[in-house]
Image (cartoon, coloured by chain):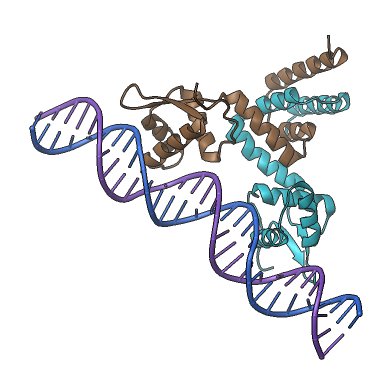
Chain colours: A brown, B cyan, C purple, D blue
Amino acid sequence: MTDAPTPPQKPTDTELEILQILWQHGPCTVRVVNDEQNKVKETGYTTTLKLLQIMHEKGLVTRSEESRSHLYQAAVTEEDTQKRLLDRFLDTTFRGSAMKLVMQALGNRRTSQDELDQIKQLLKKLEDDSSKPTP
Amino acid sequence: MTDAPTPPQKPTDTELEILQILWQHGPCTVRVVNDEQNKVKETGYTTTLKLLQIMHEKGLVTRSEESRSHLYQAAVTEEDTQKRLLDRFLDTTFRGSAMKLVMQALGNRRTSQDELDQIKQLLKKLEDDSSKPTP
DNA sequence: ACAATTATACGAACAGTTTCGTAAAAGGAA
DNA sequence: TTCCTTTTACGAAACTGTTCGTATAATTGT
């Protein structure tokens, strides 16, 4: 092994958009990523290319150069990234109060009964765990 | 009235840190804000001053120039800002799924029984409301 | 009144991000 | 082969956000 042990970098907004595309599509060529971006916002092809190259340097994506069109792939999982960003967001915006955030998130948006049930289930589990923390 | 009807701007990270200080302390002089910042991270006085001036231009803060040391005050409420930022964060990071965010937030951090109770109460209220949406 | 301190204003340097023009290499079709 | 298309690589411009040096004005103390 030579390098890139941990890529604990905070992706920028645009980088996150690209990661979303990669998470949803799996390995993609620059062309595919660019097409996806253009569905939302006009973006030059070399702009997308450059971004992917930079993300590669940062270790956010890996790439296969086997075929002429390189295949880019997310090097970080969606959940890890969400967790990292959520931690940061919670601290900077809600001063660490998960509860305030949860209350706002549930209050602001319409949540389906099915989703509410899932949350209730999690709450029950959290309460059970807290009664026997270290088994 | 002349201007500044709505300041719907997304504060930068540093601006948010300053807003937090203003929300916690109420109207502050540059000196006070700078002292607070220095408790966390060394920051030059004129750096703080410049930031506050820019935030003033953007309409994020108001200022009173009555005394020589101007008094700066948040022009946006903490809750409005949290709501705005949460909406954006939810879309960019969790693709709009409030549930996924809530599950992560509750799962990642230790939440007290009291807080869990508050959330359960909110869930009950949400379920009640959904049965009679428009009274 | 004078010096020292403290404030504001302003502009410029710096760093990071995003965009794009242009060149060069690779491949495919005529 | 030669031409056309697609791709990568590279560098520089355009932006944004942050930091700070310096000038100037107001205030205080001696």
Q: Is residue A100 left or right of residue A46?
A: right
Residue A105 is situated, as x and y percent measured from the top left of the image, at 71, 33
Q: Position of residue B120 (x, y in %)?
A: 82, 24
Q: Position of residue B77 (x, y in %)?
A: 76, 50
- Tell me: residue C16, above or below residue B7: above
Q: Quadrant of residue D22?
A: bottom right
Question: Above or below — where is B58 with respect to A24?
Answer: below
Q: Is residue B70 left or right of residue B97?
A: right
Residue at the image point whose x is 71% and y is 54% from the top: B43
Q: Is residue D16 left or right of residue A71?
A: right
Which quadrant is the C terminus of chain A positioned in? top right
Left or right, A75 with respect to B46, comes to left
In-front residue for pair A113/A22: A22
A53 vs A110, nearest the viewer: A53
Residue A7: give x, y in percent of width and height.
57, 29
Residue A128, by quadrant, is: top right
Closer to the camera in the image, D26 or B82? D26
Q: Is residue B103 visible in the rendered structure shown here? A: yes
Q: Residue furthest top?
A: A135
Residue B32 against residue A49 in the figure, above or below: below
The answer to whether any part of residue A108 appears in the image is no
Report how many numbered discs are placed on residues in the image. Answer: 0
Q: Residue at x 57, y 25 (%)?
A: A78
Residue occupying image coordinates x 73% and y 21%: A119
D25 in relation to B34, above or below: below
